[in-house]
Image (cartoon, rainbow, N blue to C red):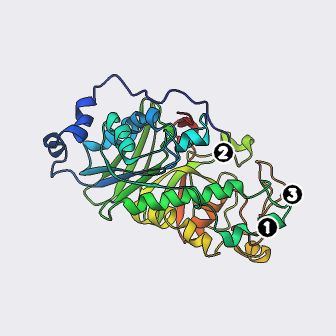
Amino acid sequence: MSIGTSKPCNSVDEAVDYSSLLQARVHGVQQVKTLHKETKDGSLAICVSGGLRGAQMCAASLVSAMVQPNLERLRKVGVFVATWADRQCSNRTRGENTGFLKVTKGQVQQIYGKAGVNVEDIWIGNSVGQGIPGRFNKSWGSHSSSEYPLGGMHMLDGTHRMATLWQQCLDLVPTDYEVIAHVRPDQHFPPNYRWHFQKESDGIWEVNIEHKDSSWKSILQNQTVYMSLNKYHMDQKLLHVLPKRIDVGDKSDVAAGTIPDDRLGFGLAEPVRAVFATMNVYADQGDYDISQQKYRTRWGAPLQDFSGPITLLNPWHTWVREQYPEKLLKHHILQRGLKYTLISDDTVSPYDIVTLERGC
């Protein structure tokens, strides 16, 4: 998957001093109470899930982009973290990542506390044994690498771990939170990038994502989750003709520009939980481990993907037939009877302007 050039992740806008406002969430109770006036309504949970690599450099950018813009308008904004004890820094050895860099709850609180927020709750687990269940992976060796679109199930094994953290993080979030966004610890949100969530007097939720002079707005609909368009898995010649948003709600919709990017998603709490807390549950019970005939009946004939694999489906009984994680996510959303909306505007889409910091 193509990833934008990494850049320093500790930059926040210097035009306005938010430090006293944000530090109140760490060092003081009185100011937080003042911010959370009774006239404000609505609650936002931000689920940070994934390896903690890059978090120390990127936490401040998350606060600047998502936390601070909503403190003054919502009744409650909470940050929750689910991660592995293995820090997973790409520039460190496994021994270092699980040794002196091993993640603790104290370190998580320190990283995000320094950025200006208390983490409401934290889950830290061992990634070993969290991949695809043994009843599936025991058959992998009976197939040659050419029988797999990606040469094997390694990437999807990582997907299982990723979805485990989605589920663990969402399990931390109390049920009274009305909107949930899931992000990664290693995501760098650029300066002048703001996510504004607003609950109107009639109970309707809206989001307005701003970057410099551009913006993307939407009402948050029931039974719908929101993500970026993943542009890696489509014909690049079609990018210039895409609308700024793409709405998908039909299994027969296989047109270019319908693959979601799984790195960041948001929406009303109920559909977010229904998608991101359940993908492993349904996949592990075999909902996507179906015959080729049933796959064709459900999704149509598998298509040659623009990202290149010649083999179109994983072998039967290896976990899921889908070629790659993003297609599995698409199918999971639609199979659950839900819809999704994709941000395709490259001036505000997280896929286009949010980069990853993989080192420590």
Residue 57 horizontal/vertical position (percent): 46, 32
Residue 166 visible in the snapshot: yes
| 224 to the left or right of 318 | left
Q: Quadrant of residue 149?
A: bottom right
Decide which of 269, 224 is in the foreground and name it. Answer: 269
Query: Residue type at mark 2?
Result: Lys
Where's residue 201, x and y in %?
A: 25, 56
Instruction: Give the quarter of the image for residue 113.
Output: top left
In space, the residues marked 2 and 1 are separated at their CA atoms by 26 Å
Mark sitting earlier along the chain (1/3): 3
What residue did someone put label 1 on? 315
Q: CA distance from mark 3 to mark 2?
A: 25 Å
Q: Secondary structure at mark 2?
A: loop
Give the CA distance from mark 1 to mark 3.
10 Å
Few, some or many residues within 10 Å of mark 3 (<14, 14–19, 20+) = few
Residue 317 is left or right of residue 349, and the answer is right
Secondary element type, mark 1: loop
Q: Amino acid at mark 3?
A: Ser
Left or right: 267 as drawn, with respect to 254: left
> Residues at badges 3 and 2 in contact (C-beta under 8 Å)?
no
Residue 231 shows which numbered tag? 2
* In front of the other: 254 or 161: 161
Q: Earlier in the sequence, mark 3 or mark 2?
A: 3
Residue that numbered label 3 is attached to: 146
